[in-house]
Amino acid sequence: MLPLLKLLQDGRFHSGEALGKALGVSRSAIWKQLQCLEAELALPVHKVRGRGYRLANPLLLLDEATLSVDATCRVWPASVVQSVDSTNAEALRRLAARQEPPFIVLAERQTAGRGRRGRNWVSPFGENLYYSLVLRIDGGMRQLEGLSLVVGLALLQSLRAAGVVGAGLKWPNDVLVEGRKIAGILLELSGDPADVCHVVIGIGINVNMLVADKAVIDQPWTSMRAELGRCVDRNGLVCELNRQLSRYLDVHLKKGFVALQDEWQANHLWQGRKVMLTAGAEPVEGVVLGVDRSGAIRLRVAGVERHFSGGELGLRLRDDS
């Protein structure tokens, strides 16, 4: 189906005869592939007698050849899969099969995309960015302190470079625009956390998605297209994200999170706000003071400063904040 999609991605009408000729197949074969596009990938196709077929919405497909021209992609080679359960899961499988990092896995669609705390990440075909970067980590867990926050800074600057100037950070792994989620981060480890291990940096960005099932997404959301009023080329976004990640990860490697602590706090949307922290059975109420040198959240709780960290923690604004 991918060759057919490449012909249809411009959103214009193409006759069945022209499509069949371009692909070397019959018109009936084209018809069957179009049915598969609708059934398997949920891509609506407009069929008009005398004009042919076109996608209801144009696509800008990810392209390995385009990405390979980017300097960072030559260091972090990227592969694009059409459909996968999740790019993080695929990255971990490739690690288990002894593919040598660094490398990037991208997908046009995820069938079981996931976020933090087991949440589902809605992943329609060809609309958003599903990205996993695999890196080798030497020296144990200390090299990972504040890493998710550093990735958040790189992601934030990538969005701003594309024109989403209202984006800001929410501890620990989200990027919001006016209270609506536009992107998230999920880090997963493989190997010995006390010695040599690998980290999978999973990033999901709502790029060109305009409609989603409210029953599936349980929080306010937005997309780059909704904010900018135009479609975004995801290939260019990948290249910009790579450049920003390379820059911020280099600072983190050489100087640690402390070198980026002030910048992160300056971009934290909930600085000084009243929040509710989900930490075990009892929620904790407090005021956000910032983050510490390791990336833990600092809260003033009943007049006392306390620090919290951990992958299962959740943070939300208090109703009266």
Image (cartoon, rainbow, N blue to C red):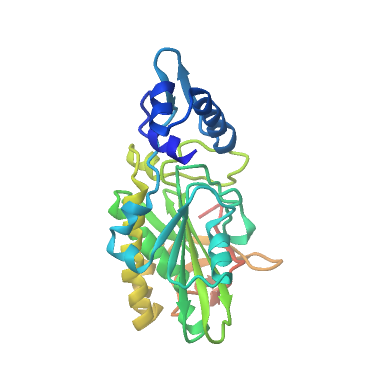
Q: Position of residue 197 (x, y in %)?
A: 53, 79
Q: Is any atom of residue 118 visible in this view? A: yes
Return the residue nearer the eye: 297 or 186: 186
Residue at image position (54%, 48%) is 83
Q: Is residue 282 above or below residue 8?
A: below
Q: Residue at x 48, y 57 (%)?
A: 184
Considering only vertical position in the picture, is 138 above or below 282? below
Instruction: Count numbered badges in the picture.
Output: 0
- In x, y percent, where is residue 126? 45, 42
Q: In the depicted view, which residue is nearer to us: 237 or 134? A: 134
Q: Considering only vertical position in the picture, is 230 above or below 313? A: above
Observer-nearest of 160 and 239: 239
Question: Residue at horizontal 53%, vertical 57%?
Answer: 87
On the image, the x and y values in percent for residue 34 come to 52, 29
Considering depth in this image, is 183 or 59 the residue closer to the camera? Answer: 59
Position of 161 compared to 155: left or right?
Answer: left
Which residue sits furthest top?
50
Direction right: furthest residue: 281
Residue drawn at x 47%, y 22% as measured from the top left: 46
x, y percent for residue 143: 46, 81
Whether residue 301 is visible to the viewer of this picture, yes or no, is no
